[in-house]
Amino acid sequence: MSLIESKNDIKNIINTYTKQWKWFVLAAIAALLMAFIYIRYTIPEYEITSQIQVVQDKNSTNELSMFKELDVFSGTSKQVEDEIQILVSRANFIDVVKELKTNISYMALGSIIDSEIYGEPPVKLNFMASDSIIAGTTFNFFVEFTSETRFSFTEAEDLPAKEYTFGDAVPSSIGDIIITPNVKNPKIHTGRRYQVSINPVERVAGAYKQNVFVAVSEDGSNILDISMNSTIPQKAKDIIDKLIEIYNRNAVDDKRRIANTTSDFIDNRIKMISGTLSDVDQDAQDMLTEKGMTGSGLEVGAAVQVSAASRQNLDNARNQLQMVTGLKEYMNGEVGYEEMPVLDVGSGAISQATAQYNQLVAERKRLLQSADEQNPIIVNLDQQLKGLKSTMTSSLNALETNVGMNVSTLQSQLGRIQGTIYSAPKNQKELRDITRKQETTESLYLYLLQKREESQISFASAAPRSNIIDKAYLASPTPVKPKKAITYLASLILGLLVPFSVLYAKDLLDTKIHNKHSLEEITKDLPVLGELPFLSKKDSKIIVNDDRSVLAEALRILRTNLDFLISTKNEKDKYKNNVVLVTSSVPGEGKTFVSTNLSMILASTNKKVLLVGADIRNPKLYTFFSGDSVDKLKSPERNKDAGLTDYLISDKLSVKDVIKPMLVYNNTIDVIYSGKIPPNPGELLMNKRMGALIEEVAADYDYVIMDTAPLMVVSDTLLLTQFSNHIIYVTRAGVTDKSAIQFPIDLNAEGKLNGVSFVVNGVSLDNLGYGGKYGYGYGKTTKKWWKF
């Protein structure tokens, strides 16, 4: 394909769509109008955002801290990711819905759109059913103010409403409801209709969970951005602020619960040790009173000084052993999973495991608020807690063994040192034992008092997990949905795409001939003589003398092209090269219309023209020569109804007997009608008189036009091609299939048809000419489309 042909194809493709510009304009206007209606009646959504800082736990350890300092790992820390999951947990959203009571919504019903009322509903509701029932139910009803003191109630919009007085108990499927007005002047609300919707708390919480987005401000940062889109900005602000409040409150409650557990454990130990200390003090007092001792210990001072260091170490070891034993007994006596007291037993691993155990217990309790113990997450936490408890028990057993061995060693060492004291008076030795026991018990008592104070300080100073940087606020006064510019642009593109798609699909599925250009793409070397315009019912089917219509101009071009073929083609032996056969593929393509008007345009040049109705199966020629505009000139009276079939059957009739001279719109033309319809048309056309007829009229006339039967329907036309010099094959725009054109092309290649040329009939005005760009009607004034 040459470059010029390629450019022409592109121009033709573009022209296919530009010719239908009106549809594109209408579609664009309709799309923009729909976009305007959509924007006008769509409730806008706004973005509400907030920002918080996650406070890192100072006591927590992180094995990857060294690698983070070296920038080996990057991204969000694990703790921040965990806090995000805790923040947007389902349990938190359930608490949000319960505290804000957003599972009950109020809608003001309008004629076109309904709008939600938030903050100050028109009515107050008091349900007789329990809160647990209301929290899990789905229920809708409609309320309409009928007067200042009365209202109508119905559970379905299409059901008849019942009227009640404000404050009455209204029966419903979920129990009685007491409805009271929540407006200053109920009278001005008369006639207004509201819909109250009650939805399950968990469903509303799930919807909020899907609509709230939490993301880290930037990699490695502890700052979280929280956002939510809503048609009611204040509602979204309340939801986000309440979510942050509940998140911080739960964190504080978890820390205080651990502190309380530790404090309770220490109080129990203090009570027990306090009794022991009182007993020891009483024993020392009784002995000093009974023995009359001063208790100064000067007699054994030297020995005591020697063993002071060993005794102190032994006391410390015993204190540690007692703490380890106490914690071990607490763990063995624990049923279920509760927070463990945080004690310093001399092992960092056990302290760290205790902190991790308490964190998992707190997470388990929070999840149990919205799930049961069979939940896979709860089961997983139970397994982790069980593993931690087993590890801690093993660690405590090992630690108890080590501390016990240390105590035994110190006791042995102290025993050797005390060998020197055995020589002291027995009373002094007993007093020292009591004093030692008193000092040990007192040191443990003071240690527990210190830990209890630390626990109380921890309870009082429990801080939330996050600091609020920005409370929820409106991110922008411009709504995020719908976006006007994007909506109009998308609508315009879609509006233009619809007619384009329709035209493209129509063109893709179209297999019909539409004008001369589309026919020339198939015929290639075979000529296309011209194209005739489509005629409406009010248009004349036959041209008149000095006609200036588009049809007449198209026929003149057809006449000129036909004369060119006649003058350039070699003449046959018998004829003057003036016999033209007109046919088509199937009926209805306009072959009779073309043959008739071609005869008229040829006759307008004062040429002798004979029109032969050779379609003897379905003659239509007579329909064009009737009415006041046709004047049948003088012809033999005895054979006035004789036609072609009569001539072929009867040897008595001559050619002149079947020729009918006519004056049509001041043009003289001779016509041979088809005659009576014979039972054997094919055999009749094979009569040798047919050849004699054509030979005779070809010599007497300048043009002989033969209107024949459709070529693809019957074989009659093939029988007549031997008498013709030219064959005009008529196609009809929008009717003739492109595949049907291949039939005469193949016959021409096989030599069964000679001198084949084509005519396109019924071409619409926008397709007339070369792609509709250059049409007919030169010198004819046409009114512009915008002038009515």
Image: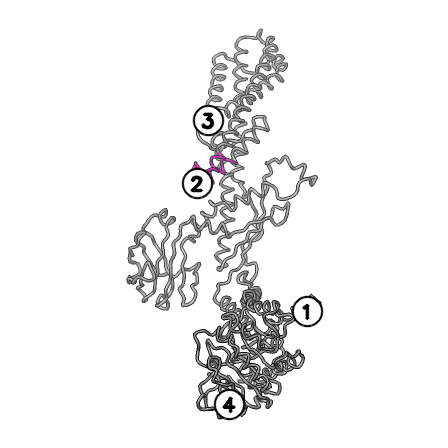
> Amino acid type of disc 1?
Glu
> Amino acid type of disc 4?
Met
Q: Which residue is mark 4?
A: 662
* Badge number at residue 5: 1
* Badge number at residue 387: none
Q: Nearer the viewer, mark 2 or mark 3?
A: 2
Mark 2: which secondary structure?
Answer: loop
663 in relation to 170, above or below: below
Asked whether 376 falls inside the magenta stretch, the response is: yes
Crowd rating for badge 1 (residues with CA inside 10 Å; few <14, some 14–19, many 20+): few
Q: CA distance from mark 4 to mark 3?
A: 140 Å
Q: Are marks 3 and 1 in contact (CB under 8 Å)?
A: no
Q: Which residue is mark 3?
A: 271
Q: CA distance from mark 2 to mark 3?
A: 39 Å
Q: Earlier in the sequence, mark 2 or mark 3?
A: 3
Q: Are marks 4 and 2 in contact (CB under 8 Å)?
A: no
Residues rendered magenta in the picture: 359-381
Q: Are marks 4 and 1 in contact (CB under 8 Å)?
A: no
> Amino acid type of disc 3?
Lys
